[in-house]
Image (cartoon, grey):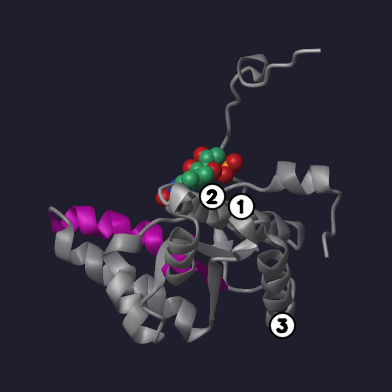
């Protein structure tokens, strides 16, 4: 599946904010990539609590319409809303599709009932599992020539998302990942000295 070495794919995964609505690969291929990354993502106790919804075509456009509707309600001024709207149109809505990442709270609750001594850990581990799943999808899409970014409009759009696509109420929305053909380079990125971040004791 990876068109690049793992090293290149990890390095080239970036936040792409200039994306277009075409795709170098078919929608079926995108679906199979996402099914693959969801299937093989690790999770606490192999609980497999991660859920993903792939939005394509009008469904992709709809989600960014919901974000704009909600932002309009809470923006301090028309000017502030216009700035947000432009960013959403250019960087997210302009793309080919959107992935919605969820965590199934019924799985978390079951684990809490089964293993009460880890009760407080399961919601945290669920978030970790979702994050792992997100980054695998991000890397896999990039390696096929699709740029993506990671967004968090959860609290604003939860209700609309559940209603529109009749999503199980136990599925908690965690993140959104708009993706599309890469139309511009990612922003410059600075790096902390690696010696401050990785310690080695031999
Ligand atoms: C947990 C997490 C939350 C993030 N939330 C957002 C977000 O809400 N919006 C956004 O545009 N980028 C978000 N990002 C992307 C980061 O800003 C980005 O990964 C970071 O600046 C490094 O740039 P790169 O992705 O190009 O390597 C998030 C990344 C992580 C890991």
Disc 1 within 8 angstroms of ligand 1 (CB): no
Q: Which residue is mark 1?
A: 132
Residue beneath the point at 42% across and 52% down: 119
SS for callout 2: helix
> Are the two marked residues, 2 and 1, in contact with CB atoms closer than 8 angstroms?
yes
Q: Residue at x 46, y 67 (%)?
A: 110
Relative to 9, say whether 33 is above or below.
below
In-image side of 171 versus 57 (left or right): left
> Which residue: 49% across, 62% down?
114
Q: Residues within 10 Å of mark 2 (few under 14, many from 20)?
A: some
Q: Compared with residue 134, is residue 38 higher up or lower down, i.e. above or below?
A: below
Q: What residue is disc 2 on? A: 128
Residue 28 marker = 3
Instruction: Inspect the magenta stretch and tell me whether residue 81 lies in it.
Output: yes
Q: Position of residue 139 (x, y in %)?
A: 69, 54
User: Is residue 149 among what the camera can see?
Assistant: no
Q: Earlier in the sequence, mark 3 or mark 1?
A: 3
Depth check, front residue: 113 or 58: 113
The quadrant of the picture occupied by the N terminus is bottom right
Magenta-highlighted residues:
77-105
The residue mark sitting in front, 3 or 2, is 2
What's the distance in space between the residues labelled 3 and 2, CA to CA? 28 Å
- Residue 19: percent from left, percent from top: 57, 61
Percent across and percent down for residue 71 are 24, 62
Judged from the image, the secondary structure of the residue bearing numbered disc 1 is helix
First reached walking from the N terminus: tag 3 or tag 2: 3
Residue 66 vs residue 125: left or right? left
Q: Is residue 172 above or below residue 125?
A: below
């Amino acid at each position: 599946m990876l068109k690049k070495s793992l090293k290149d794919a990890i390095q080239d995964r970036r936040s792409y904010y200039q994306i277009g609505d075409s795709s170098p690969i078919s929608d079926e291929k995108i679906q199979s990539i996402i099914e693959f990354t969801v299937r093989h993502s690790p999770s606490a106790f192999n609980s497999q609590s991660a859920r993903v919804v792939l939005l394509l075509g009008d469904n992709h456009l709809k989600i960014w319409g919901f974000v704009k509707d909600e932002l309009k309600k809470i923006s301090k001024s028309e000017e502030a809303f216009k700035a947000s709207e432009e960013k959403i149109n250019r960087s997210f809505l302009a793309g080919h599709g959107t992935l919605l990442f969820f965590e199934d709270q019924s799985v978390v609750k079951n684990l809490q009932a089964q293993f009460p001594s880890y009760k407080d850990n399961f919601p945290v581990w669920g978030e970790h599992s979702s994050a792992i799943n997100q980054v695998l999808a991000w890397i896999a899409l990039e390696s096929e020539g699709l740029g993506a970014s990671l967004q968090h409009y959860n609290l604003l759009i939860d209700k609309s998302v559940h209603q529109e696509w009749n999503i199980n109420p136990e599925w908690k929305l965690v993140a959104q990942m708009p993706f599309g053909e890469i139309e511009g380079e990612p922003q410059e990125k600075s790096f902390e000295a690696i010696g401050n971040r990785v310690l080695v004791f031999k």
